[in-house]
Image (spheres, helix red, strand yellow):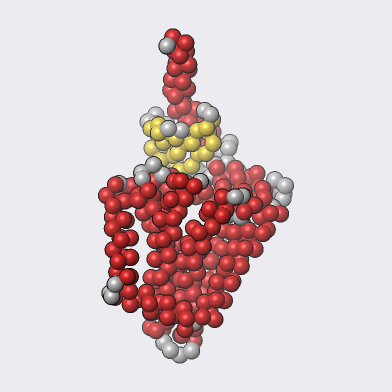
Amino acid sequence: MRALLPLALALLSWALASPEAARQAVERWLRGEVSPSLGEVLKAPPEEAPRLLERYALFPPPPPGLSVNLESPRVEGERVFFPASVGEVVGVVVVVLEGGEARRVYFRSQALALPPYLLTPLAGLGFILLSLVWTALLLNPSPFRAWFLEALALLRGERRLYLLTNLLLYGLFALGAALAYGMPEMARAVQTLFGGALEALGLEEAMGKGLPVLAGVIFHWNFSQGLFLTGLLPALFLGLPTLLLNLLRYFAFGFALSPALLGESFLVHLPTLLLELQAYILVTFGGLVLLAKTARGEGYRKGLRALLLSFYLGAFFLLLAAWYEALEVRFFL
């Protein structure tokens, strides 16, 4: 026991020093000593660009006017949180420590963070009930089953457009994945940029909350941000905005999630990719059907129904993807 006492004291002193290390990291970050500007990243020579982009992703520059309370840190494991605000927008500055050194520093706005209720056991139970009820409604006569069958009939009726949309978007994903083999450092930097954006939203908080909570959080994010805000809403403008957005998004996804980076785990993650990407393909397809029906003189209203049916089918794909991805994160990766 006496032999363990020095080790315990050393660990205690390290734990007590963690807020101080985090405080020093925030001070350097606020002074601009650790964050390259976006201009520096864009102007960097090819051999320097990946390193600067990764640094930009790990230490995004503080927003103008950021005020940080360095006297009230909150420690959770290797993360230290400092109250912060930009004008009336409140949030926290998060410092991720690794071996006593800052690995990431970023500002998380409370407005963009996950709603706290999503991280409760009740939310997990609610997502289980949603999944069971929705599945039961699809297996038995109901309006939900009728809409599902009508959506499948739409795919058959517009099969050429549907296949073209799949070939185009999955093809861009494959192209990005192939290019990552020739530029692995840049691809890794883009992957870090995507991961940092998700971490800044607080998605990591759902990791230790149980499988149903994690699946519910994944579904909430993909549905609200991916399918609704950047899918359905721009698709209402005759489909083209969603198509253009996804052309860029699928190429970037392929580049950042290439087997060149994921290795053998790519096969484990492949079902998640196929399901989630198919959901966004469906809403893109629905927007193009809206454009086609309007151009053919069938009316915007008929095209809108096609878009909503595609959106509905895509939402069910995201439900399946959320459960698989939660299992994948908890048990396979």
Which quarter of the figure has residue 304? bottom left
Residue 163 in picture, x, y percent from top left? 55, 76
Give the total of numbered labels.
0
Rendered view: 278 above or below 325: below
Residue visible at 41% across and 61% down in the picture: 320
Residue 120: in sight, yes or no? yes
Residue 286 in picture, x, y percent from top left? 46, 75
**Pick the front one: 119 or 93:** 119
The quadrant in which the N terminus is found is top left
Which quarter of the figure has residue 306? bottom left
Residue visible at 63% across and 58% down in the picture: 177
Residue 273 in picture, x, y percent from top left? 52, 59
Q: Is residue 34 left or right of residue 302?
A: right
Q: Is residue 101 left or right of residue 314?
A: right
Rendered view: 164 above or below 271: below
Residue visible at 27% across and 49% down in the picture: 122
Extreme bottom residue here?
A: 297
Residue 40: in sight, yes or no? no
Extreme top residue here?
A: 2
Residue visible at 39% across and 53% down in the picture: 215
**Pick the front one: 210 or 307:** 210
